Amino acid sequence: MKASQNENEMGEALLGEHKAKMVMDVQVVESLRAKDTQAFRSLIERLQQPMTAYLHRLVGDREVALDLAQDTFLQVYKEIGKTSQDLFLDAWIYRIATNYGLRYLHRKRLKQFVGLDRPSSSEDFNANLVVPGPENQAETRILVHEALSRMKPEDAVCLLFHYGNGFTYEEIAQVLEMTPEAVRKRVARSVEKFRTLYGTSPQTSKR
C-alpha cells in the first residue's frame, strides 16, 4: 500500500506545473528570422514559464534556471537567422535549453568531484523547491529532486520532458535528436532507476 502511495506522490511531483506545447509555425519562424521584436516578445511570453520550470526541475536551483532560460532566449535571438524556415521551433529551443542545463550540471559535478563545491544538501533543495501547499507535498518535491540529481543528467532530461512537460516520444526525439524508439527505451530505463533511487531515500523509507 505504501509503495503504491509513494509512486502516486512521485508521479504528481514529476508533473510539471506549466505544461509546454510543441508548435511548428512557419510564419512565426519567418518573423523571428526577420528579428521581429513583437515575435520575440510573444515567444518569450509563451515559453518563459514552462522553460524555466523545466530547467528548475533539471538543475534544482530556481535562480540558475532563470539565468539559463535567459541565456537560451539570447542564443535563440543570435542563431535564429541561421535556421531554415521549416524549423521545428520549440524542439530547437528546448534543445538549446537542455544543452545549457546539461553543461551546468556537468560543471557542477566536476567541481564536486575535485572538491571545489559541496553537493546540495536537503536544506538547499528545501530553499529552492518549497512551494505553497501541504508540508508533505513540499517534502515529496524535495525527495524527487534528490532522486533526479543522483541520475545521469541525460536520463533525468528524458523523464522531465515526458512526465514534467508532457512531451511525446516523438517530440523528445526531435529535441534530443534521437529516434522515438531510443527515447522510449531510455524513458523506461530511467523510470526504473528513478523508482529505485526514490524508494531508497531515507525519508521515504521512514513512511
Image: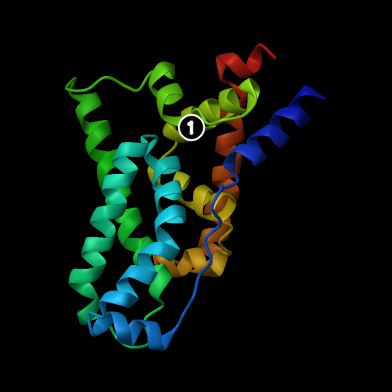
Percent coordinates x, y for residue 155 in the rendering: 46, 46
Q: Where 11 falls versus 6 (above or below)?
A: below
Tell me the quarter of the picture where residue 63 sits: top left
Percent coordinates x, y for residue 165 in the rendering: 54, 55
Q: Where 136 falls versus 59 (above or below)?
A: above
Using the rendered image of the protein, determine whether residue 99 is visible from the camera's viewpoint.
yes
Using the rendered image of the protein, determine whether residue 92 is visible from the camera's viewpoint.
no
Q: How is the image coloured?
A: rainbow
Q: Residue furthest right?
A: 1
Q: Residue furthest front?
A: 38
Mark 1 neighbour class, 10 Å CA radius: few under 14, some 14 to 19, many 20 or more: many
**Which of these two is toward me, 37 or 19?**
37
**Which of these two is toward me, 81 or 178?**
81
Percent coordinates x, y for residue 47 in the rendering: 42, 62
* Identity, as a three-letter code, of the amino acid under mark 1: His
Q: Residue furthest top?
A: 206
Placement of the N terminus among the 4 image quadrants: top right
What is the count of numbered marks? Answer: 1
**Which of these two is toward me, 134 or 102?**
134
* Residue at screen point 39% across, 57% down: 48
Placement of the C terminus among the 4 image quadrants: top right
Tell me the quarter of the picture where residue 127 sits: top left
Q: Where 84 falls versus 161 (above or below)?
A: below
User: Which secondary structure lies at badge 1?
Assistant: helix
* Residue at screen point 51% across, 54% down: 161
Percent coordinates x, y for residue 167 in the rendering: 56, 61
Relative side of 21 to 110, left or right: right
Mark 1 lies on residue = 145
Relative side of 161 to 2, left or right: left
* Residue at screen point 66% across, 40% down: 12
